[in-house]
Image: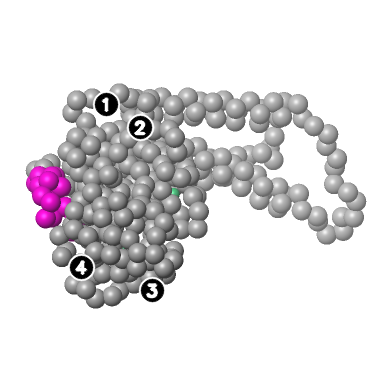
Amino acid sequence: MRKLALPLALTVILSVVAVMWVQRATLTAAPAAAEAAAVDSLLRLEFYILAVFFVLCMVFFLYSLWAFRRRAGETGDGAHFHSHTGLEIAWTVVPVIIVVAMGYHGARVIADLKAVDVPKSADDLEVIVTGQQWSWTFEYPEQGVATTDLVLPSGRSVYFRLRAVDVIHSFWVPEFRLKMDTIPGKENVLRLTPNQVGEFKVRCAELCGTRHAYMESPVRVLEAADFQAWMDEEVKIANDPTKAGPKVAGQFGCIGCHSIDGSKLVGPTWKGLAGHDVSLADGSTVTADDDYLRESIVDPSAAIVEGYADNVMPRDFATRMTEKQIADVIAYIKTLK
Ligand SMILES: [Cu+2]
């Protein structure tokens, strides 16, 4: 028993030091949602417990190396021990109690946040988030607006409906703390209230393929009035045929490959395309009517323009763009006489 005095004393002293260190340590990015406080205190509590157990294990490990080392002139084996029932029961029961208690506490904290499996309330801002390899798209169904950046008001609860097109992704803005998988064929719900104006990033938090690490989109949290002004402008653009198409063409990078002035880029120019004949790589000719334009966007392999490479135009517009966005960009192409 006397031999235990030194390691026990060291454990107590170093545990106090470790707990004080955890208390001051920055464990996560600065919070930006109302739900963050509860998650952060849960995390810090876990770190307190971890700190004490880390110290306990390390002190006894290092102390044993030192106290029971082979001394000069010692040649025999050390003492042999065979089980210690009391000790084994203790180191099974104590961790089980801690793990179960932490699990219960964590489940309570999550339930209290009312962030998952909740019905939408009238005041929530509804946003449909769609993840696919390897980008995010956002829709505000009540306003009829779709974007590739996530813009949110500060201080209003947001009701996210999370979807995936291809494989499982995970919607995560670290500053909001809460995270939820997006699953093909199943809609998940997440509700949270951003409360800090600023610029953040939504990241995919579920390994989803070669470009998983680049699956990020900008998030901007604005004051309520600025958000309303932004939304009014977006609604105006969405309803203005002369602006909606150019905006979509910019958002999805079409204009990086298609010029509107007749010059040849990676793809054919849009100037004078609509209504005219197009020579295809297979030797046939088609008239660029609405159906052809639509097909060229949602299924680029169906018809390849003569002199241009197949497999250059992205294949994912059919799932990334809303029907309205496709119609808007077609209407725009038709204005480029
Ligand atoms: Cu992903």
Q: Nearer the viewer, mark 3 or mark 1?
A: 3
Whether residue 81 is visible to the viewer of this picture, yes or no, is yes
The relative height of residue 266 versus residue 36 in the rendered view (above or below) is below
Whether 134 is among the magenta residues is: no
Q: Point out residue 211 in the picture as x, y percentages from the top left corner.
A: 46, 58
Query: Seen in the image, is 230 located left or right of residue 9?
Result: left
Marks 2 & 1, CB-CB < 8 Å contact: yes
User: Residue at 23% across / 54% down in the picture?
Assistant: 330
Label placed on residue 271: 4
The relative height of residue 309 versus residue 25 in the rendered view (above or below) is below
Residue receiving disc 2: 189
Q: CA distance from mark 4 to mark 1?
A: 45 Å
Q: Residues within 10 Å of mark 1 (few under 14, many from 20)?
A: some
Amino acid residing under circle 4: Lys
Q: CA distance from mark 3 to mark 1?
A: 52 Å
User: Residue at 69% across / 26% down in the picture?
Assistant: 89
Residue receiving disc 3: 307
Q: Which residues are magenta?
A: 229-248
Task: Tell me which label, 2 or 4, sits earlier in the chain.
Answer: 2
Marks 2 & 3, CB-CB < 8 Å contact: no
Amino acid residing under circle 3: Gly
The relative height of residue 205 versus residue 181 in the rendered view (above or below) is below
Q: CA distance from mark 2 to mark 3?
A: 47 Å
Marks 2 & 4, CB-CB < 8 Å contact: no
Q: Pick whichever, 220 or 77, lies toward us.
A: 220
Label placed on residue 120: 1
Q: CA distance from mark 4 to mark 3?
A: 17 Å
Marks 3 & 1, CB-CB < 8 Å contact: no
The extreme right residue here reads: 76
Amino acid residing under circle 2: Val
Task: Tell me which label, 2 or 3, sits earlier in the chain.
Answer: 2
Q: Pick whichever, 316 or 223, lies toward us.
A: 316
